[in-house]
Image (cartoon, grey):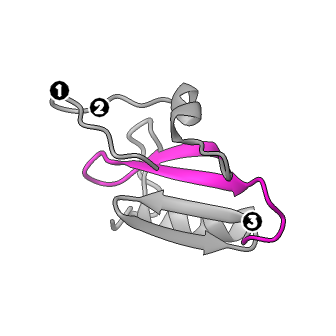
């Protein structure tokens, strides 16, 4: 994920922006946000040799073997883009 400088108070992301967070090795399938409004990218690997799912937020990357595991991790920590918290959203 590339870090982008945005010169406005809050960047407004939508699910239509997933292509901006895709790379040659991973395809972004869902965007969420942290409590501070920073983007969280949930990506699927294009290579079956790698761990199949990756969650990127800030300068951190966590990999998972399944989409269900990645979403369980995200539900406990992050928010949907629609400002609705899922299980409190700690991060």
The part of the chain drawn in magenta is 27-50
Asked if the magenta segment contains residue 74, the reply would be no
Callout 3: helix, strand or loop? loop
On the image, the x and y values in percent for residue 86 come to 47, 56
Residue 26 is tagged as: none
At label 2, counting other C-alpha atoms closer than 10 Å, the crowd grade (few under 14, some 14-19, many 20 or more) is: few
On the image, the x and y values in percent for residue 16 come to 56, 25
At label 3, counting other C-alpha atoms closer than 10 Å, the crowd grade (few under 14, some 14-19, many 20 or more) is: some
Q: Earlier in the sequence, mark 3 or mark 1?
A: 1
Contact (Cβ within 8 Å) of mark 3 with mark 2: no
Compared with residue 56, is residue 72 higher up or lower down, i.e. above or below? below
Q: CA distance from mark 1 to mark 2?
A: 7 Å
At label 1, counting other C-alpha atoms closer than 10 Å, the crowd grade (few under 14, some 14-19, many 20 or more) is: few
- Label 2: which residue? 11
Asked if the magenta segment contains residue 44, the reply would be yes
Left or right of 61 on screen, residue 39? left
Residue 8 is tagged as: 1
- Residue drawn at x 72%, y 72% as measured from the top left: 51
Callout 2: helix, strand or loop? loop
Which is in the foreground here, disc 3 or disc 2?
3
Which of the image's four quarters has the C terminus?
A: bottom left
- Residue drawn at x 48%, y 47% as measured from the top left: 32
Question: Relative to the observer, which residue lies in front, 86 or 30?
Answer: 30
């Amino acid at each position: 994920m590339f870090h982008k400088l945005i010169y406005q108070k809050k960047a407004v992301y939508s699910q239509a922006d997933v292509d901006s967070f895709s790379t040659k090795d991973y395809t972004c399938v869902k965007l969420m946000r942290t409590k501070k409004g920073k983007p969280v990218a949930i990506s699927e690997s294009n290579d079956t040799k790698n761990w199949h799912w990756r969650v990127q937020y800030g300068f951190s990357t966590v990999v998972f073997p399944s989409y269900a595991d990645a979403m369980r991790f995200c539900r406990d920590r992050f928010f949907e883009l629609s400002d609705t918290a899922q299980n409190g959203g700690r991060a």
